Image (cartoon, rainbow, N blue to C red):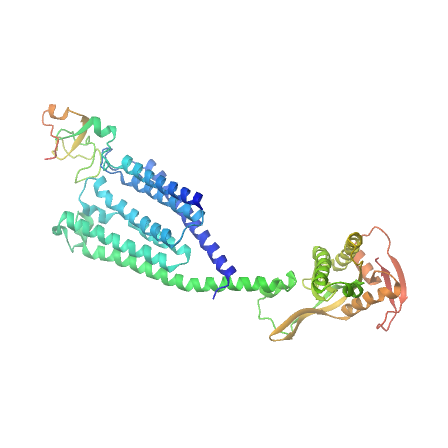
Amino acid sequence: MIPERIAQDLIRQQHRSELLVTAVQLCVIFLLSIVYYVAPRGYTADAPVHSAPLGLSLFAILVLFRLWFAYTRQLNAFWLGFSVVAEMALLLFTIWTYHLQFEEMASINLKNTHIAYVFVLIALRALRFEPLWVILSGLTAALGWSLIVWHTLYSVGTNIITWDYVTYASTRSFHPGSEFDKVLAILLVTFIIAAVLKRARNTLFKAVTQTHAARDLARFFDSGIATKITQAEKYLLAGQGEIRHAAILFTDLRGFTKASALLSPSELIAFLGEYQHLLVPIIQKHGGNIDKFMGDGILASFGAVSPTTTYAANALAAVDSIMEAVEIWSKDLQQRGRPVVSVGAGLAVGEVVFGIIGNEDRLEYTVIGEAVNLAAKLEKHNKAENVKALATLTTLELAEQQGYAHGTDKEKRYGRCVAGVSEPVDLIVIA
Amino acid sequence: MAKRVIQNTAIILAAIAAAIAALRVHTDWLDHHPDEVRTRERCYSITRAGKNDCATHIHSCAAQAERDRDPREWMMVPKGTCLKIAGGKQQAS
């Protein structure tokens, strides 16, 4: 069973196909009209029928008629079937009128070159990806051509039948083999296209389903990682990893635990959503990738998913923007009478391994390394330093080399003991 | 929805009207004849070689008559004049 939204997607594709068919037909009508008006006439002005303008104008009417139903999305099976049969019948009718236009024996209809358009009409129906309409079009054509053949023999008589090809090709005669050829070719083309469509339709169906699946799953990943997964040339396996110079940012919601006691579960999730809506776009705008959400914490990496030469500068700029945005947000929270929170951030740079962990069925792209641990510890260390955002001095030095320019000098604190880190660390206070 | 029904009816009627108009202009089936036919007539057996007007069963168009006064070749003349011309016939012979 196809989910509703995927069925909708298929219907949208059919709708576009129908408009495409109409556009192609209108272009051909326009082109043939130009040819008609430019080319010299091959018949008298008082001929009982002027086949080309008659056929072209009736065809234009039919196409515009169908366009109305297609455009207003009323083109149901009945109207589509009607127009498929009508367009083929009209083409063959136009071919049939040629003997009237030239005031000739009906046998000249059999040599009409417009039969080539029969194949064009059949093939155009393939754009809808539904074998039924191709078959309907093809069977109409085979039946219609048989009628033209029958009318020829009926009106001219069976004495024009010849099995001599040269006689057929050069006189007003009837060659049974040639007519058999045409009907056979029409039927073969019809069934070949129908068979191809049947296969293509399955592929299309799978493609639409999988595109939806990929889009659904991609929402659970960072966009950079989603692209990396869907465009991977090799089958992804755990254990594939690359060494990257990257900046790692840890953020955490301060006062969240206190707030969570006051809020209902859905309010809590809504509150978290507000926070993530605030931070995620800022991180992404600065070229960062969200590695994971951990409750109220966010782990983001800069330059790990795809290498950059400005990762440290980007990360510092991101932290600056985050701090500014959070300032405004907490004022806003205060005005709304909501629990006031702030954001703590820890930033470190270094060599990390960016790779896939997990087992065959449940994989995860992540960053692993000294810098990741350090960033997490710095985030916690904020409390000890009584500040909001800390980074290593190395980060600032590297960022400045990479073109980071900040309005005010960052306060430097040398040789600090960070819990869980054996060596003293030189820190800078971002906020 | 009623509005859509009215629109559809209008479109269907317009399509039928346009189809009838096309048939009227491009065929003589609806008893409509262009001026060419109302004021002029075909006259056989009087054309000079290469000066015929149009189709016969041996060629499709003008100026292909191979000899003078071919009884199968014709030209358009003002209505009523054909039978006044020596040898002029209204039917191919």
Residue A153 left/right relative to A213: left
Residue A221 left/right relative to A333: left
Q: Is residue A286 something one can see in this rendering?
A: no
Residue A195 left/right relative to A234: left
What percent of the width, then of the height, locates residue A189?
A: 32, 58
Q: Residue at x 88, y 60 (%)?
A: A412
Q: Along the line of sight, which residue is nearer the eye, A293 or A30?
A: A293
Q: Residue at x 26, y 59 (%)?
A: A184
Quarter of the image where the C terminus of chain A is located: bottom right
State whether residue A90 is above or below residue A411.
above
Figure label count: 0
Q: Along the line of sight, which residue is nearer the eye, A126 or A399?
A: A126
Q: Is residue A181 something one can see in this rendering?
A: yes
What percent of the width, then of the height, locates residue A238?
A: 64, 74
What percent of the width, then of the height, locates residue B84?
A: 11, 23
Q: Residue at x 58, y 64 (%)?
A: A230
Q: Quadrant of residue A44?
A: top left
What percent of the width, then of the height, locates residue A31?
A: 38, 42
State whether residue A247 is above or below residue B28.
below
